[in-house]
Image: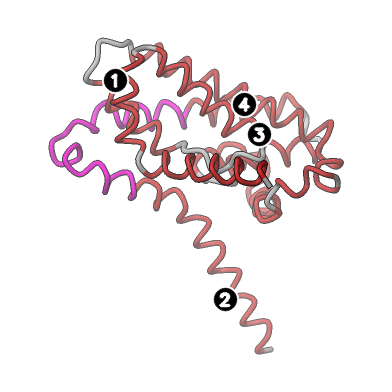
């Protein structure tokens, strides 16, 4: 029972962090300085590297981090490169986990920790977009975590995967980090950062909501026939 309580606490903390990242990051940066950059590296790596951690913050984290570093003396370009490396390594790890252990994980003990909806949704994206899913998935929570894993399970050639991985990781990290860096401290945005963070999260999950609604409507149509 204790292990489930720990898992619940961990998930609750991660969700709370995602929703209130704009409160946590500045305080942590003030307390630990550059060590916060390592924390960002770890979060990005875990979110992209493990199919069981899709709940970790990604888009909002990068935006708020960019806004935070704009008010510091840190080199934003070096930070972007550092986090880009985390994103690429994370997807690479996830790909190889899927390639060598994916089938066993989906049917064995670890299956209980993997949300089947993530795998199903990712398969739908692959059917629709092919290899470009690796790039598109960077901007879609849940699918972002599932895409490299499914690519590995499906034995996508690693050279192809790596190309999509690098391009997607670069666009994702640099776009959101620099968006926060250049726009996050505009008074209107800075004074309403809670709202902005929620909007970013909402925009991130819109593709999932749309796909779910589309699937529901298609299902209703098929029942009427």
- Residue 69, disc: 1
In contact (CB < 8 Å): disc 4 and disc 3: no
N-term-proximal mark, 2 vs 1: 1
The Cα atoms of the two marked residues, 2 and 1, are separated by: 44 Å
> What secondary structure is found at the residue carrying circle 3?
loop
Depth check, mark 2 against mark 4: the one in front is: 4
> What secondary structure is found at the residue carrying circle 2?
helix
The Cα atoms of the two marked residues, 4 and 1, are separated by: 23 Å
Magenta span of residues: 171-198
Look at 83% across and 34% down and name the residue there: 101
Look at 55% across and 39% down and name the residue there: 10
Image coordinates for residue 18, horizontal then vertical, percent: 42, 41
> What secondary structure is found at the residue carrying circle 4?
helix
Asked whether residue 136 is in view, the answer is no
The Cα atoms of the two marked residues, 4 and 3, are separated by: 8 Å
Residue sticking out furthest to the left: 187
Comparing 97 with 35, the one in front is 35
Left or right of 100, for residue 158: left
Look at 73% across and 38% down and name the residue there: 151
* Residue to which mark 2 is pinned: 217
């Amino acid at each position: 029972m204790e292990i489930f309580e720990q898992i619940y606490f961990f998930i609750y903390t991660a969700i709370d962090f995602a929703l209130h990242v704009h409160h946590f990051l500045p305080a942590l940066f003030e307390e630990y300085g550059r060590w916060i950059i390592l924390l960002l590296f770890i979060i990005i790596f875990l979110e992209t590297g493990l199919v069981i951690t899709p709940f970790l913050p990604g888009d909002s984290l990068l935006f708020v981090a960019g806004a935070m570093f704009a008010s510091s003396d840190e080199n934003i370009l070096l930070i972007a490169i550092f986090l880009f490396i985390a994103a690429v390594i994370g997807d690479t790890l996830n790909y190889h986990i899927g390639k060598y252990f994916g089938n066993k994980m989906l049917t064995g003990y670890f299956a209980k920790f993997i949300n089947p909806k993530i795998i199903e949704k990712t398969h739908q994206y692959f059917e629709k977009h092919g290899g470009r899913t690796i790039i598109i998935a960077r901007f879609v929570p849940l699918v972002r975590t599932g895409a490299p894993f499914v690519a590995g399970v499906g034995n996508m050639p690693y050279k192809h995967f790596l190309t999509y991985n690098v391009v997607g990781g670069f666009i994702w990290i640099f776009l959101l980090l620099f968006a926060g860096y250049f726009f996050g401290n505009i008074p209107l945005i800075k004074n309403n950062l809670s709202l902005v963070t929620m909007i970013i999260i909402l925009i991130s999950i819109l593709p999932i909501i749309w796909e779910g609604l589309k699937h529901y409507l298609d299902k209703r149509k098929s029942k009427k026939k």
